[in-house]
Image (cartoon, helix red, strand yellow):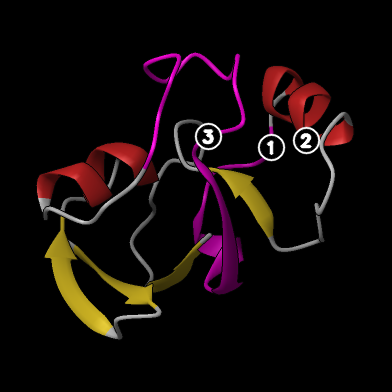
Amino acid sequence: MTTLTVLPSGKSYDVAAGQSLLAALQSVGEPIKTKCGGGAKCEACHVMVPEGRKSLSKIQRAENEKLDGMVGVASASRLACQAILGEEAVTVQLL
């Protein structure tokens, strides 16, 4: 288990490590968008990760290519469908 804090609500949840941020956010009822169902084909699940980025899986090619073509991307940007939770606490800002 790991702690997932969601901004702007500030709510924290205990969620299972090893699942995507998208799955974790959906499991706790947070309003996260997805159009492609988690295939890194859209940008609807774009989130910022201000804390705990090192606990997430490394950015793979499909996610990197999608992020490269998006507007408003920063170093804290991730696609929630591609970022897999590790054991350390993570803070996510929904956009």
Q: Under tag 1, what secondary structure?
A: loop
Of the residues tagged 3 and 2, which is closer to the observer? 3
Instruction: Find out whether residue 48 is within the magenta segment.
Output: yes
User: In the picture shown, does residue 14 fall above or below 45?
Assistant: below
Q: Is residue 94 left or right of residue 14?
A: right
Residue 84 in view:
yes
The residue that label 1 is drawn on is: 59
Give the amino acid type for the residue marked by disc 1 in the picture: Ile
The residue that label 3 is drawn on is: 44
Residue in view at x 59 percent, y 21 percent: 42
Predominant SS of the magenta segment = loop
- Residue 74, disc: none
Mark 3 crowd level (few <14, some 14–19, many ≥20, 10 Å Cα): some
Give the amino acid type for the residue marked by disc 3 in the picture: Ala
Residue 48: give x, y in percent of width and height.
60, 62
Of the residues tagged 2 and 1, which is closer to the observer? 2
Q: Is residue 91 left or right of residue 24?
A: right
Residue projecting furthest to the bottom: 10
